Each structure stands twice: as structure tokens, then as C-alpha cells.
Image: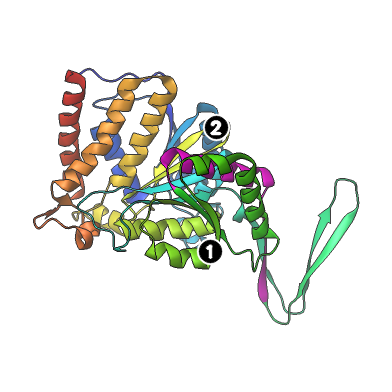
Amino acid sequence: MKKIEMKNPVVELTGDEMAAVIWTMIREDLVKPYVELKTETYDLSMMNRDKTEDAVTTEAGWAIRKNGVGIKCATITVNREKMERYGLKAIYRSPNATVREIIDGTIIRRPVVSPYVKPLVTSWVSPIVVARHSFGDIYKSFSRVVPEGAKVSLMVDHADGHQEVLPFEYFPGDGVVMVQMNLDDSIRRFADDCFRYALDEHLNLIFSTKDTVSKTYDARFKEIFQELYESTYAQDFKDKNLTYRYMLIDAASSMIVRSPGNLLWACKNYEGDVLGDLIASGFGSSAMMSSELYGMDNSYEYEASHGTMPDLYQDHLSGKPTYVNPTSLIYAWANALEKRGNLDATPDLVTYAQALKSAVIDTVDEGHITPDLKRQYTRETYEITRTEDMIALIRQHLETRLKKAFSA
């Protein structure tokens, strides 16, 4: 078949370790043979971030804001141990945090469901989607070690010139302190994204924080959600027979385990980070989850829901066979190209992207799985499949679907 044309590029952010190996396989074996691929590429590997003193990460984030659609491979987040081992210049920020701060908005993490992969939580019969605020909180915070006997205070310089000093704590022993922040406009965009997504996908919506303890910070999130719901969305939810409610996060966590699903769980940045992985594993695997960022200026970023897989990368380097589930990385590519096709009115690109996602499920349903799915797989016969063989099988199913779609 003739390669599918693209009108505009997607911004491609390459990454690290085993995720980068599979990323290349997907691009070369599942995308480029069928799509005349246009990309604006930024190398976000750890060593190139160090070479550019992390400037490349900021450039990549703004490129997504300008272009509209980005796709990101998993990347190493530098800590002190990695800085010393690789001789890096600094402990750089998480590249995810930098890009998300620029794009702002909401991360939607949705399980990729196969009828043969049974959730570990038996009550989950419909998807549970996690909406995570992508801005602020501990990801935009200041912290430092504080010695015994020190006093900490927060000074607010108001626009009218007066200063307000807020005493915090006297340290009877050595300790640590952290200050974090968020913005009303960002919280409001997050709430708006959640309400609109729930309506579009016909999901009940829960938002949860801990306002009984964080009586100002978390309470502000709760207030903004409630104000927006009452002023804009209450009637729409009622018309669609959907519900919105606020729950304390501990109560919501308990309820989720007993829930049948069919809901959108909206969480602050850190809680969404943690609970998104929990929900993914409960449905099958962290690799069986799509991750989409709905940002400012109608910008979108798609990424894997897992990390760089360093242990498997060492196996790969030593020549050992690897058994990696490529689903989340494939869905990142497919969802980005589908969004590009929708924005540019190129229906063939949309058809291709949807066929690629279906080909992944076809392969799993046929009995070819990776070890992460073994415990929950319900077919009596199956084969544990190597990484490159999984990609090849997905390509076969993709070609079958494309021939059917484009021969009509």
C-alpha cells in the first residue's frame, strides 16, 4: 500500500535505555513502513540533556506547545547516584516535570483492556481512568535540610509592597523543610479537563484530596472543582445521568477497590503519579496503560506510562533475550498520530493509528503475551513472546487490518 501522508509533524522526544530500544523498533517496524513520517525530534537522552545543560528539555516542551502534538519516550531522571556514576554536571530536574510544567494541563491514564487479561481486583469490570494534575505541588517545590535550632518562616511580598511573614516551625533537631505551590488558573484548567473528559467518555467523576488535614492548600482544589461544577457542569452531568463527588483520598482509595469501575478518578500531581501506577497494575500491567497530557494552547503530549526498564536494558546489552510488553509505547505513537490526523483532517492517518492499537490487542488475544500478563491471562494456551517477536506479530496483525481498511 502507498504510504500515508502527514500534513504536519509530531514533536518526537527520544529517551533512554530499554524504552529507547523499543521506541526505535516501533518507529522503524510499525510506523515508517506505512506512514510518511514527519517529526521534529529532540534528543532527551540523559547524556544529551547533560551536554546541553538540560536546555534541550525546555526547547522540547515549547516545541510541543507550538506544534500541538508531541510524543515522548521514557527518560532517566537524574539523582545523585547517577550524577556521580556518569560524571554529569548536575542533578537535573525530571524531564517529565519540565515538559509538563511548560504544557500544563491534565494527564489522563487509561487502561488498555483485553478480554483475556483479567484485572487482579475482581470487582473491576469497567475501566478506571486516572486524571492527574500535571502542574505544581512537590514537582514545583523548594526544599532544604534544616539544622537543629533553626527557625523557618515564609515571607510573602504582596503586589502593594507590604510584606507578610508567616512563621512555620522551630526545629528541635536536624530536619528538612519543603515549600510547594500551585496556581488557581492551572487548577481550574485541570478541573475543566476532568469534567469535559468525564462527559465525553460517559464516566462518573471523583475528585479526592485531604482537605481535612491540608485545610488551605488541598481545600483550594476542592473549592475550585465545586465552583466549576455548580456554575458550568451540574446540568450536563444530570442530563447524562452521571455523578460528580468529592471524597477524601483515603476514603476514595478504599472505595475504588470495591468499585465496578466506569469512573474517572481525579487526583493532584503526586497522588495521580502513584495511584496511576497502582490502577495500571491492577488492570494488568503498567505497560497496559496509555498516558495522554491535555495541555494549554490545544497542545497534547503522549508518552509511555512506565520507565526506562534499566534491568532489561542490561540484559539486552549482554545479548540475553528480553520479554518486554511494548503496549504503552505503541499506544503513545498511535495516539499521537491519531490526534495529528484528527487535527489536520487526514482520515487515513487516523485509520492507521486505530488499526495499530487494535493490532496490539489482536496479538494479545491470540495468545502471544509477555511475562507481566501471565498471572492474569485467562486463555488456556499462550506463548511467552520475546520483544522483537511481539513487534513482528503486531506488524502482521497491523497489515491485515490495513489491507481490510484500505481495500474497501
Q: Which residue is mark 2?
A: 65
- Quarter location, residue 395: top left
> How many discs mark residues in the rendered view?
2
SS assignment for the magenta stretch, majority:
helix
**Viewer-side residue, 5 vs 189:** 189
Instruction: Give the answer, above or below, for where 167 lies relative to 119.
Output: below
x%, y% of residue 220?
68, 55
Question: For the residues marked 2 and 1, what is the alpha-carbon distance in whole angstroms?
Answer: 32 Å
N-terminal of the pair, mark 2 or mark 1, is 2
Direction from residue 220 to residue 328 in the image, left or right: left
Q: Quadrant of the C terminus?
A: top left
Question: The residue under label 2 is which amino acid type?
Answer: Arg
Q: Secondary structure at mark 2?
A: helix
**Viewer-side residue, 185 vs 368:** 185
Question: The residue under label 1 is which amino acid type?
Answer: Ile
**Viewer-side residue, 321 vs 298:** 298
Q: Residue at x 16, y 45 (%)?
A: 389
Direction from residue 223 to residue 42 in the image, left or right: left
Instruction: Give the answer, above or below, for where 87 lies relative to 69.
Output: below
Q: Which residue is mark 1?
A: 249
Direction from residue 302 to residue 50 in the image, left or right: right
